[in-house]
Each structure stands twice: as C-alpha cells, then as structure tokens.
Amino acid sequence: MSEKLFIFWHYLSRLATVLCLCANCTLVLATPSANEPISPLPKRPYAHPHIVQLGKILFNDVRLSRDNSISCAACHNLAKGGDDGQKTSTGIDGKRGTRNAPTVINSSLNMAQFWDGRVNSLSHQVMGPITNPNEMGSEWDSLLEKLRKDLELSAQFERVYADGITRENLIDALVTFERQLISNNTPFDKYLQGIPNSISAFAEQGYKTFKQIGCAACHQGKNVGGNMYQNFGVVIPYPKPDSDDNKEDYGRYEATGKESDRYKFRVPSLRNVTETAPYFHDGSEATLEGAVRKMVHHQIGRPIDDESVRAILAFLKTLRGEVSGDLL
C-alpha cells in the first residue's frame, strides 16, 4: 500500500469514526430520558381489519341494549374525548349511573378497569355495561338471539369467527376494536422523543411544575395515570355528599371490602384530559382548571399560584392526541 493510499484510508477511517460518534450523539439527544416519569405512547397493535370493523359496528349498535336505545358510543363518544360529557351517564329507561364515565380512549393501557378497578381486563369491562340494569340492561341469551336474526351481521361474524355470533366472539370483537383506540401523535410524545419545538416553553414550564409539586407521583407512565390506586383526599379530605340523594362513594372498598381501600380510586389517565370534562369519579368538577386546583389542594395540600396553574394547563393540552379517523 502506497503512503498516499494509506493516509487516505486512515483519513476515511477517522471520518467514519467521527460520523458514528455524531450519529450516536444525535441518537442520545432524540431518545426519551430514562428518568422521565412519563413515557411515550405505544403504537396501535396490529389487529385483523375485519375484526376491528366488526368491533366498530358493535360499538355503535344500540341493539346491544335491552330496549335498543343505548350503544357503547352513547357513553363513549370517540369524537368527543371518548366519554359523554355528563356527570353520570344515562342508561335505559332514563336510569342514571353512579359514577362519571371514564374515557374509552387508551383504556387498554390501564392496569384495571372502572374507577374502583373491579376488573383487570377489557374483556370483563365490556361485559359489565351490557348486562348492568342501569346501563344497557341486556341478557346474553336474548341479546345473541336478537343479533343472529340480522343475516348481514351474522355473515360478518362468520367471516372471521367459525362459530359466528357468540358471547365470546362479540366480546373479542369489541375488545379488539377498543385496543385500537390509542391517541398517538401528541405534541408531548414528540417532546419526549427529542423532536425540537414540539411544545411551547410555557408548556415545558408547566411540565416541570407538574413534576416539582408532586403531580407525577400518581400521573406517570405511558398513560399518565391509570396504573395505580390512590386515596381521593390524601392530605385534605374530599368533601362528602351534601345530601342524602348522593350516596357516599367508598371507591375500591366497594369492590374489595378491604378497609385500606376505602376512598381509593384508580388514578385516571391525563391523556386527552382537555376533552373529558367533567372531572373526578363523581363528575363534580366542570372545568380542567378547577380540577387542577382541587387536586393540588386535596392531594398535595399546598397553595398554587395562578401562573403555575396556567402553565400546568398548557402542559396538559400537549397530551391531546389523535385516534385514527377510520375508527371514528
């Protein structure tokens, strides 16, 4: 090898090393910090498109209710945050529920379902409202018989399920659809991934305040909540109902009977929280600003100035994502 060729080869080797180091530096900067309490949302899982479409049909089908008046979408409007905007939902015969309807969007990422976490899977969650006398009020045998009379629906079931319309297949289709309801493409997830100018400086200040005052102790992980139980009123007790008409809600205690679970609720996700008013298990707070102030008061027990509240609200707005349009 000539001296000039050797020098040229050595130069290329050094250049390649520098480029690799630069590439590694870029990778580090673009990777979410392992120390952040919040992590980016996962992508939607793959699912058979025909099952997803069938689940969407069932989700919007009022025939799942006893009197053909209520669909899943009635309480979980995907175009409006995945809930119904009411303090408590209205079921068949005008019956009112006892708790605020949680959003169905990103619900597959929760460790358990319902405010009291009484079931651990979406499959069991789906079964609850269908047979609940205050919600859809159906009985499985009569519901399946009703649906089997629809020849087109039966054909759609048989296209993906060999045994057609059964309780298990109906539940599977609904769960498969609900697992697709992931609100990807949020500004905050882009921020976590190191994409420049994803959120404003004021929103970033709000995120820092959110962490500093202790909100992230409960609202963390990929769903910014939904992965633990917490007392509602950790520092300052939450007010009890002001009339006999409003029964006191003991939270998870009503599911477990354990005294240690009294007044505990599953921490809600804050993703898309700007779209899911009213707030709390009882739907008692109409505005997000009011919810932030009450949480700081009852859960953290410290004063908070108006500027900090506005900054936190700016941060919370960056958690709004998009559900794929074909699911709406």
Image (spheres, rainbow, N blue to C red):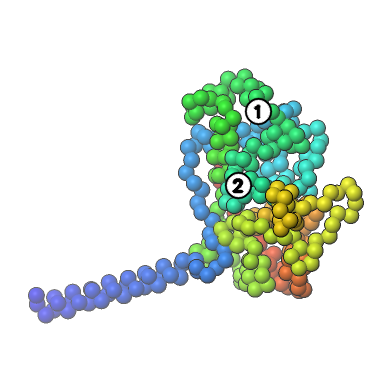
Query: Left or right: where does residue 243 sit relative to residue 36?
Result: right
Tell me, for residue 120, which label it has, or none: 2
| Residue 24 in picture, x, y percent from top left | 37, 70
Residue matched to label 1: 140
Locate residue 95: give its quadrant.
Answer: top right
Position above or below: 72 against 158:
below
Name the outermost residue toward the front: 258
| Residue 31 in picture, x, y percent from top left | 46, 66
Q: Secondary structure at mark 1?
A: helix
Amino acid at circle 2: Asn
Tell me if I can see residue 150 in this picture. Answer: no
Position above or below: 221 against 126:
below
How far is disc 1 from disc 2 in space, using C-alphas?
21 Å
Query: Left or right: where does residue 327 sit relative to residue 244?
Result: left
Amino acid at circle 1: Trp
Looking at the rendered image, the quarter that the C terminus falls into is top right
Query: Left or right: where does residue 120 sit relative to residue 139?
Result: left
Label 2, residues with CA under 10 Å away: few <14, some 14-19, many ≥20: few
In this orientation, which residue lies closer to the viewer: 102 or 180?
102
Q: Quick one: label 1 or label 2, which is nearer the N terminus?
A: 2
